[in-house]
Amino acid sequence: MSNIELSIIVCTRNRPEKCQDCISHLLRSLRNSPLSAINSEIIIIDQSDKTQVNKNTDLALWQIIYVRMKCVGISKARNLGIRLARGKYLLFTDDDCKVDENWVAKIYDKFRIRPEIDIIFGKVEADPRTQIYSFIHYERKHKCGTSYVAISQNGDRCFAVFLGPREKIFNEPCLPHANFGSSNNMACRREVFKYAGYFSEHLGAGTWGFSAEDTEIQYRWLLKRMNILYSPEIKLYHNNWLSNDKAIQQVNRYLSGMATVFTFYLLRGNRCAMSCWLYTMKQYVLAIHNCKGNNVKDTATKVVVRWFSLGKGLLNGIRLLIVFRSIPRLG
């Protein structure tokens, strides 16, 4: 019988410096928690082209499971991490994130004192230490929730941030990323994956679905009326600043992924997905309307790329309906 209380899962690909920084912050957070090296572990799933994580003395003091994975795909990596995890609580963050020093302790406390909570999401801010220009977190409220993005003085953007000010429980269908954030700051009880299945390996970075693997599983949890807690006390910093051109590509991937997920749920007869689908379509219309290039040809190219990503998202929703006939279960 395992005495592991908590497993932290980090998936990485070709970002050695950021991953090393992420692990350092995780170790600091573990040292500030009531847990020890005996009852906690860090699982690193590395899909890089070559070995990325350095073995050092600090790592040797803790239970570290390091796995090289030849295939790519964030969902495949996370699912492998879930299979390997021995803890009662599974914590997830990305290799470009730096957790707060009390991140582990606060998640652990929430699960222990609130047994009704199945999943926890936390606050995500853009990392100020890796941006030389001043920046602001831009907030936009809409019918489906509140969306955030950090924009620097030179135009760089950092996505996947969420700054909800109040703690709240969600257990009914809504637009996940606009109500409680994304999977870069997430924790689950182990039983969640046994009951609701795990990540769809057709979605996410490294697949034809591009992104939104977390949106799909979050929405699945909500359909099953699982209790999802958002807590701003559980905080980390996201270090992924993108130039304007890369930001446009990222927006295309995000919107295409969302179109895939909510087209899929609409075709499965889920009426609650309609508002999320309509929101996604509205975002596409706005994004296409706001396309601006250096000249007429450049603008036209960006408009065509946006329309193409929308079409691909809709078609991928149909494709997902064909290949994703049953909820993926852990073996």
Image (cartoon, rainbow, N blue to C red):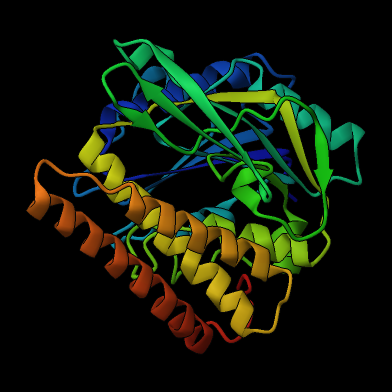
Residue 276 drawn at (x, y percent): 62, 62
Q: Position of residue 132 (x, y in %)?
A: 29, 10
Q: Nearer the viewer, residue 132 or 3?
A: 132
Q: Quadrant of residue 263?
A: bottom right
What residue lies at 69% left-to-right and 84% top-to-bottom?
A: 269
Q: Is residue 247 left or right of residue 217?
A: left
Return the residue nearer the eye: 116 or 248. 248
Residue at the spot 53% in from the left edge and 68% down from the top edge: 261
**Front-most of 159 and 194?**
159
Q: Is residue 309 above or below residue 314?
A: above
Q: Is residue 83 visible?
A: no
Q: Residue at x 15, y 58 (%)?
A: 301
Q: Is residue 244 visible?
A: yes
Q: Is residue 85 left or right of residue 56?
A: right
Q: Quadrant of the C terminus?
A: bottom right
Instruction: Say which residue appears at 81% left-offset and 58% top-offset.
Output: 172
Q: Is residue 62 left or right of residue 181?
A: left
The percent coordinates of residue 90 (x first, y second) are 65, 45
When the figure is inspected, residue 116 is found, relative to residue 192, above or below; the finding is above
